[in-house]
Image (cartoon, rainbow, N blue to C red):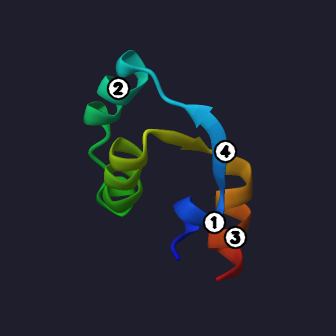
Amino acid sequence: MDLYEQNLSDVTLNKRRLKQLDQIFIEELQEIKEDMKYQKKAAYQEIMLENYILQ
């Protein structure tokens, strides 16, 4: 299970927010971006960042 899936929220992303993901070009964020587009769910970045740093 990746960081995104560990920190999923109940918030469903609307079409406008999903479209904004297309503007993310940072290589390290591409996997999370694709997961978000597939799941259409937000995640809590504060928790994700904390978990990412601890890994």
Find disc 1 in the rendering and name its residue: 6
Who's the residue at 36% across and 20% down the image?
15
The amino acid sitting under disc 2 is Gln
Give the alpha-carbon distance from disc 2 to disc 1, as whole Å: 22 Å
Residue 13 place in picture, x, y as percent: 48, 29
Q: Residues within 10 Å of mark 2 (few under 14, many from 20)?
A: few
Find disc 3 in the rendering and name its residue: 51
Nearest to N terminus: mark 1 or mark 3: 1
Find disc 4 in the rendering and name its residue: 9
Pick whichever, 28 or 5, lies toward us.
Answer: 5
Disc on res. 20: 2
Residue 36 place in picture, x, y as percent: 42, 46
Image quarter of residue 52 = bottom right
Nearest to N terminus: mark 4 or mark 3: 4
From the viewer's perspective, tell me whether residue 46 is left or right of residue 5: right
The amino acid sitting under disc 3 is Asn
Q: Is residue 51 above or below residue 36?
A: below
Q: Residue furthest top?
A: 16
